[in-house]
Image: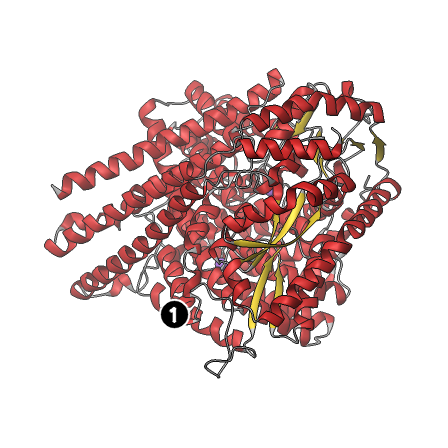
Amino acid sequence: MEWAYILFFAIVFLFALLMPGLWIAIALGVTGILGLIITGNINHISTLGNISWNTSNDFILTAIPLFLFMGEVILVSGISKKFYTSIGKWLSKVPGGLLHTNILATGIFSAISGSSVATAAGIGSVAIPEMKKRGYKKSLIYGSIASGGTLGILIPPSIVLILYGAMTETSIVRLFAAAILPGIILMVLFLIYTGSVMVKKNNQVSGEITEEITIIRSILNVFPLVLLIVLVLGSLYTGLVTPTEAAAVGSLFAIIICYAFGDLNIRKIYMATKNAIRTTSMLLFIMIGAQIFSFALVRSGVNRQLTAWIGESMFSPLVLLLVICVIYIVLGFFMDGPSILLLTLPLLFPVVMEAGYNPIWFGIVLVILIELGQITPPMGLNLFVIKGIDPSSNIGEIVKGTFPYCIIMIVMLAMLIIFPDIALRFAESISLR
Amino acid sequence: DESSGASESDSGGDNSEETFEWSLLSFVGMQHPMTEFLIEFSEEITERTNGQLTVTTLPPGELPYEPSEYLRVTGEGGVEMTDTFLPFHSGELNVASISDLPFLMTSFDELEQAMDEVMLPHIEDEFASHGTKLLFWYPWPEQNLWGQKEAVTEVDQLKNLSIRSQSPEQGAFLEKVDAIPVSLDTPEVPAAMERGVIDGVITASLNILGSQWHEFTDWGYFINFLIPPSYIVVNEEAYNELPENIREIVDEVAAEYQEKLPDHIAQIESDYKSTLIEEHGIEINDATEQQMEEFINTFSPYWEQWASEQDPQVGEILQKVRDVLGK
Amino acid sequence: MIDRLIKGILTGSSFIASVTLLFMMIIIVGEIIARVLFSHSFQVVHELSAYLLVAIIFVGAAFSFQSGSFVRIEILREKYPHKIKKIIEMIFMAILLIYLAVLTYFISILTINSYTLGSSSTSVMRTPLYLPQSLMMFGMLLFFVYVLLRFFKLIIHPGDPNERREE
Ligand code: NA
Ligand code: NA
């Protein structure tokens, strides 16, 4: 159980740096470097160069700054203000009001983007400022966007499912098919929660703006954003662009549409790029820090000892599954999803198959566990997206908002374990060539 | 100082009981047949040295290196052993990249002949100049064309098809046959194939099945575009540090794998091909001999042009390869 | 003097990164238009875009840090007495400086080795890797120098109210 000690001390040390307020990106990296030194792996420190390069030199990640930019353009041009004024009026009688638009919008956006960070970034930069103005409780706004964003890797297309499929030689088509129903159910559960929480008196919005606008006016207000979504979804699903390229197309369409229907100029575009860059650079420095941290764990043998321990423990299938869930939730506190997959899956997957689980179903379970990791502190990329978009927020508020959604995800996991058909029925009806 | 693994020796002078722990980086997933034999190879060494040298095979991504960095990382001692796939390193290796010329070697036999009779000593030198030692090499199955919708059986049908291109050679080929070379990141290939952003890819059967791309594939057109070798290399210092008896065992196991792999891989590839045809209903057509001849004729000027951009010595070696193969 | 340097770095950082982002968007859209309308692919856009992303991340880092985007946990920080807060801030800046120095050093080693070994990408472009890696190195140097200057200022004028901007 040497791995348990190393992991324990790494976590304690990380907390000792994080709690007094050291920047998360730096705390992760510093813990990793010290870990390399203490475990006698200082001779591998030059890998820091490779880590920095390989983490950032990735075309798939260009979607993050571009979707952020798209959102910022919509925001600075005033298109989003018009949109929310109209939608707010339509939804004024529905409990939960505008919060529902967050969940629905992230759900729709998920069908374009394969990444949960890109989804939260694209919707968050538009929604957060507008909803704050309308007096919604901040933790509720942050929670709905950060958690809704995680749908991006459950509702296809999904980069994480592609990675899982390639690593385990599991059908990507079937994985995508299997993810649709759980994705929709999770979205509906989010909507139900959002509706119920707004029934509580002190969560209700008192100062909702209810300008008198005509039906025609309100349709005109909603039109530009709907047009943008249709164009981006259309170019993706007709095969003109790939999910990552959709971010660039979306950005350009956003500039054109917002120039035509809103108030956009060069100065505002520059402002939008600057806001996109702030958040992107911060996120990538966190990812680099997290990679250094993982590298130290690999070099000290933690991942292999941990997975070997699971393999040798001869758990019953159900206990095995629960142990894996707990471990992924714990690792999800400190590591990003793809890293967890790369470090544990090659060794865990055969054990899980041995226990008789379906590989498609297990893929969906893992993606939900990874979604959960995106919104749990201290290392939750979606939390940091929110923090990046709204500098006045603090991690505590955001975490408070995402906590109920974490519980919902755990409920979703339980449902999948009890009723595997939620994922499998649809997947297995698909005929493969 | 990039010493390999833990030394648990307590005696000062005599190192014969010292133990060594090495990693071997694979560039395809743990379930992949190529990784399976790397694991066998590692276990064989561990067993025959009675654990004095333990080799662990690591899948790509466990360590933060890209497959294109493997040669360099091995030379620098970041890891002791890697499976260095030529197409990822053709920029760093000159003689070795002769095998990257399209249609020059179109079968395992031709590749082995070129290696044994001409190229191998030069390639060993090239690896040595990167601080690594070549243990053995094995052939990857030939790269072929794969696509969706109507099956392609001759070159004219490739016109205006969008095909994924990953290298200058593939790009040059696709342009010669009036196809549209499209660059695409690997994770985007499934979505791009499914939605028709691209019509096809160039790769081996192994990879079509291994990456689950058969789900979007209707046909294969076997043109034996090129046969990329992969090299198992070891950090030179780490190798030299081994006691002589251990080194001998490593060499011995390597020689055995060198001997048996080509047939073994040919068998796997043919199994995969049958699976694609029988279980996934993919229509596979081989290029006719006449078509192959045309490809070779169209591409020999490209070989010459490539040689003119290299050191004269590389050009001479290429000429010897052509003489040996009669091309 | 220090102030002018700091301001220069920040302006450069945000401006270069912004222009790079727009350029990245334009070339990706250009590739799509060429592919869809003219059945042509430049074959280099995806690779080039990834390099531009590297530039955005590292060149934009100083600006990102200055704007307070680097996330930290604030629960305890809010409760520190003023004096302790200043000391802790100093320690954190020192840790940051060391971390950036280490990272910059190994990024530079990577870049220099790419140059001496002649490493290139495996794509159609066969890009010499030291070129895009120099962008990373340049950005890290910029970030490092920026934090170094800030650290100097913190030592010289511990009470300077302008220093609290990043919160
Ligand atoms: Na998605
Ligand atoms: Na987390």
- The residue under the point 44% across, 37% down is C53
Above or below A230: residue A105: below
Residue B249, x across and y down, in percent: 66, 68
Q: Which of B33/A369 is in front?
A: B33
Is residue A245 in view from this perspective? no
Q: How is the image coloured?
A: secondary structure
For residue A311, above or below residue A161 = below
Residue lying farthest right? B278
Label 1: chain letter: A
Identify the amino acid type marked 1.
Answer: Phe
| Left or right: B287, with A192 as reference point | right
Q: Which image quarter: residue C63? A: top left
User: Residue tagged by mark 1?
Assistant: A13
**Residue closer to the observer: C106 or C30:** C106
Q: Quadrant of the N terminus of chain A?
A: bottom right
x%, y% of residue B218? 80, 33
Foreground pick, B128 / C144: B128
- Is A166 situated left or right of A358 in this image? left
Quarter holding the C terminus of chain A? Answer: top right
Q: Residue at x 84, y 34 (%)?
A: B284
Q: Look at the image and tell me whether residue C128 can be seen.
A: yes
The x, y position of residue B216, in whole percent, is: 75, 36
Residue C92, image quadrant: bottom left
